[in-house]
Amino acid sequence: MKSARITGPNEPLKLSESETPTPQDNQVLVKVKAVGVCHSDLHLWEGGYDLGDGQFMKVTDRGVKYPVTPGHEIAGTVEAVGNDVSGISKGDQILVYPWIGCGQCPACKVENENLCDTPKSLGVFQDGGYSDYALVPHYKYVAKLDGLDPEVATSLACSGLTAYTAIKKSNQNSPEFLVVIGAGGLGLMGVQIAKAITKAKIICVDLDDQKLETAKEMGADFVVNSKDPETAKKIMSICNEKGADSVVDFVNAPPTAKLGLSVLRKRGNLVLVGLFGGSLEMSLVTIPLKSIIIQGAYTGNYHDMVELLDLARKGVINPMISKRYSLDEANNALEDLKARKILGRAVINP
């Protein structure tokens, strides 16, 4: 099989040939039809995350070992199964749940493997879907598409799943006004999901007018361009000067986090999602005085993914695929993502 592999930080992905694996026991071999191009792939390629104040967290410090085949948003057709697999057969079209855990830590024991203490995620800690084939370690990590387009389904394993989890967290205080910061692939999915599962008026913020127009088409009630120095005032005006009940920051950079805190009302809820990086100073006394909640959201569990697939089948959400690349163009895909040239989501078709 052919794979595009990361051999080291910021080095061009290298195409390599290897023997196609034969699934054993509970394993499933998937013929990859499409794999999403995600910002997490970009961090893996760049070697880590900006922690702010000149600090950089290397992915190798988290347990990543190069070379590795990236790609965790994997959709395709079952090519072969191990002897102990049940309910899944050759020819089934499936989406892979990539956030595989150790099975033993407190998170795994309550089926939140995405929050595992020692994760084994596909496309991060073990080889993923930038390849002709992907080997899934257990059939419990695949879900049947049942007619859903594989390309559309890819983002539901990560960006859509992350957006779904974040919006569910933002909905815990039944918001009247919900601010979505960022109108990239993640944020646009968040707008659609918020429209589907909350009763909130949705305010989308981004610095790109084209993306904001798309956000309006996907259900945003209001849009604000963050290049405007009066952005916070405009949001407060929309919220009747009381502030937003919930803010979901799909960028999570110092300016966006600061904006989110500034427009949050008393008893408000800030959900930080993006991995842009950096650090932030905040007024600590305002947190107890306003009794606000600040929390993170990182992907979701397998059951969340199944719920999301159901929403997609019903047409409630429609992931937007804007660019397609061959496996030979994997480097171009990551370069385009880094340069913000991708509206919505891109996929690689091996």
Image (cartoon, rainbow, N blue to C red):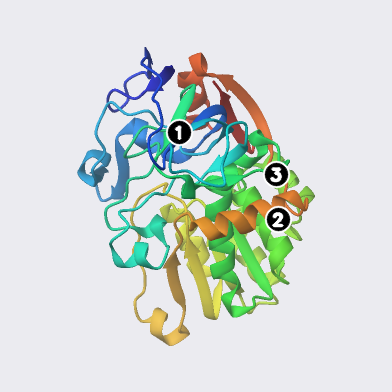
The residue wearing badge 1 is: 71
Residue contact at pointers 1 and 3, CB within 8 angstroms = no
Contact between marks 1 and 2 (CB within 8 A): the answer is no
Give the residue type that dot 3 points to.
Asp
In this rendering, is residue 332 above or below 70? Answer: above
Q: Is residue 290 above or below residue 206?
A: below
Find residue 149 and report its horizontal and vertical position in percent: 70, 36
Residue 184 visible here: no
**Residue situated in front as seen by the camera: 314 or 14:** 314
- What is the x, y in percent for residue 348? 56, 25
Q: Residue furthest left?
A: 61
Give the left or right position of residue 323, taking residue 123 as reference.
right
Disc with the residue nearer the chain's start (1 vs 3): 1
Q: Quadrant of residue 172?
A: bottom right
Residue 319 occupies quadrant: top right
Q: Residue at x 65, y 49 (%)?
A: 188
Q: Which residue in the structure is indicated by mark 2?
A: 311
Q: How far apart are the alpha carbons under marks 1 and 3?
A: 22 Å
Q: 169 or 337: which is nearer to us?
A: 169
In this picture, residue 60 sits left or right of residue 33 = left
Instruction: Pinpoint residue 168: horizontal percent, then vertical percent.
Output: 58, 67
Disc with the residue nearer the chain's start (1 vs 2): 1
**145 with respect to 128 (left or right):** right
Mark 2 or mark 3, which is nearer the start of the sequence? 3
Q: Residues within 10 Å of mark 2 (few under 14, many from 20)?
A: some
**Image-quadrant location for residue 295:** bottom left
Residue in the image at 39% along x and 84% along y: 288
Question: Where does label 3 land, which residue?
Answer: 146
